Image: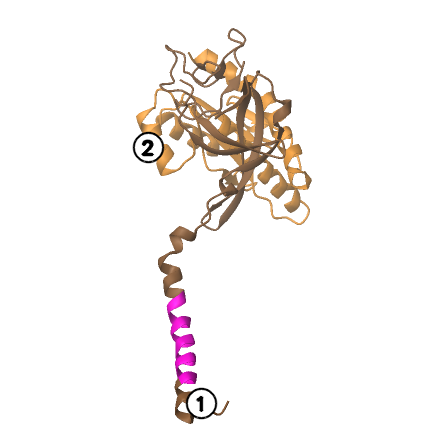
Chain colours: A orange, B brown
Amino acid sequence: MKYTVQDMTIFQQQKQFIDTAIVPLVQLDFSEQALLQSSMAASYLLSLTNYIEQQFKGRMVLLPPVCYTMMLRSPTLLQNIHEELENGGFRHIFYITTDVSWRTIDAEKAIIWLPPIPLESMDQNVRKSILEDQLKQILPTFLADWNTGQ
Amino acid sequence: MSNNRVSRRQFLGYTLTGVGGFMAAGMLMPMVRFAVDPILQKKGDGDFVQTAQKISELSNEPTRVDFSYEQVDGWYTSEVTNSAWVYKDGDNVIALSPVCKHLGCTVNWGGDTAHPDQFFCPCHLGRYEKNGKNVAGTPPLGPLDQYEISEKDGFLLIGKPTENTLI
């Protein structure tokens, strides 16, 4: 499910089945040396999360990416989003990011960190198989959490 | 020659009729063209998407075939990749949609080790038989959709999803 009117209508009716939220955390960095790297990481993360959403559409809601600058990156930001989602009825909340500093900021929450891969230079088929491989790596995290929740 | 002389009056008459006829036709033709346009619309291969799968290489075990096409959404054009589970049933080629009829996840063939001969949806443990029939007692309420298929130079073409006709 995406954060759109059509999907959220289904979400409201089928809340007992759709219990997982995916939050992409994207860092904005417009400094000269980091701009290309951070934009590459952002588009990789969006491709990957869209692919995950396609595979698990019936159980996950993919939120629009949460963008932050270095100053905004804090446990408070995550805590606010987390509370909102918990109130919204989500039992499994995953954060997915390419920014390694989140691991030290908040170790309690389910933060999935992935090294960014430059997809833009790749052929469509290679791109697809890389995203599949990445999903296979993350999949156990999802399944483990789903199994404990039941 | 001298008997059929064309008078000045006749000549002008013919010329005006000819030119007037062309002008009238120039105005009427587009109108007629607009009116009958729906009949002239070509309907053909456009709905089918080419895949890289050779039909001769298919077996009776479902294999995943990916295909992609461009989708325009407002100003945003994106390349959408979809897949189908394709197998041979005798000489018939069957292409099933991987979209779970419960809430739209993607199902996998043999995704559940306890049921290697069924389609499996990991989200809510939905299962389907090989022909797409939903297994009773699991969440899905209907069978998997079936794709229209076609063939071109030995390669598989995939069309629109329709209701499952196998059950």
- What residue is at 52 percent from the left and 28 percent from the top? A52
Per the image, the residue denoted by label 1 is: B6
* Residue A137 against residue B11 in the figure, above or below: above
Q: Which image quarter is the N terminus of chain A in?
A: top left
Foreground: A128 or B153?
B153
Residue A103: x %, y % from top left? 58, 26
* Residue bounds of the magenta highlight: B14-29
Q: Which amino acid does label 1 sit on?
A: Val
B18 inside magenta stretch: yes
Indicate the chain on which mark 1 is placed.
Answer: B
Foreground: A95 or A7?
A7
Q: Is mark 1 on a helix, strand or loop?
A: loop
Within the image, what quadrant is residue A85 found in?
A: top left
- What residue is at 36 percent from the left and 33 percent from the top? A8
Q: Are marks 1 and 2 in contact (CB under 8 Å)?
A: no
The mark closer to the camera, 1 or 2, is 1
B104 inside magenta stretch: no
- Overall secondary structure of the magenta stretch? helix
Q: Residue furthest top?
A: B114
Residue A92: x %, y % from top left? 44, 21
Mark yes or no: residue A74 visible.
no
Foreground: B79 or A134?
B79
What mark, if any, has residue B125 been given in the picture?
none
Per the image, the residue denoted by label 2 is: A9
Q: Is mark 2 on a helix, strand or loop?
A: helix
